[in-house]
Amino acid sequence: MDKRDHKTRYEAGLKTRAEVLGKLWVEKSMASVDPFSEEFVELLNTYCWNDIWNRPGLPRKMRSVLNLGMLCALNREHELKLHIRGALNNGLTKDEIKEVFLQVAIYCGVPAAVVAFRAAKEVFQSEK
């Protein structure tokens, strides 16, 4: 693979990551990259945030809906909070996020939805 192509994909992914998750959060996250995590962060920025998030097949808003549901199902509260912020940045309303979590309650279980609603409440309060 051409290193220039890889660098372009990395930079495009980093840009998308900042647009979705917030520039300040990404800057803080990138500042903590060390030799141990460097290759993992490269994978995130190149494959996750560019090769998948920048595909034309789904709009970012729909990708956010999918992420919210999957993170609830997987019980990944830390990442869920991050992607609730991302969902807001991608144009989901609080009411749409609530509807996702009501759907989660039926298909993933009430305990997963309890965590999701609690996480959303924390995120919404921090956004004020």
Image (cartoon, helix red, strand yellow):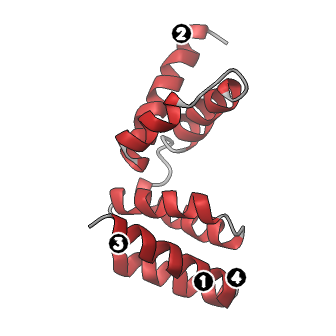
Which amino acid type is shown beneath numbered disc 4? Cys
Nearest to the eye among marks 4 and 1: give it: 1
Quadrant assignment for the C terminus: bottom left
Q: Secondary structure at mark 3?
A: helix
- From this viewpoint, is residue 128 visible? yes
Nearest the camera: 41 or 52?
A: 41
Which is more N-terminal, label 1 or label 4?
4
How dense is the environment of label 4, judged by Cα within 10 Å: few (below 14), some, or many (20 and up)?
some
Q: Are marks 2 and 1 in contact (CB under 8 Å)?
A: no
Location of residue 94 by image quarter: bottom left
Which is more N-terminal, label 4 or label 3?
4
Q: Locate residue 112, reporting x and y percent.
A: 66, 80
Label 2 to label 3: alpha-carbon separation: 42 Å
Q: Locate residue 82, reporting x and y percent.
A: 50, 57
Q: Residue at x 62, y 66 (%)?
A: 77
The residue tagged 3 is 125
Which amino acid type is shown beneath numbered disc 3? Gln
Q: Residue at x 56, y 77 (%)?
A: 116
Which is more N-terminal, label 3 or label 2?
2
Q: Residue at x 53, y 87 (%)?
A: 102
- From this viewpoint, is residue 92 visible? no
Question: Height in image: 79 above or below 27?
Answer: below
Mark sitting on residue 108: 4
Q: Locate residue 22, reporting x and y percent.
A: 37, 46
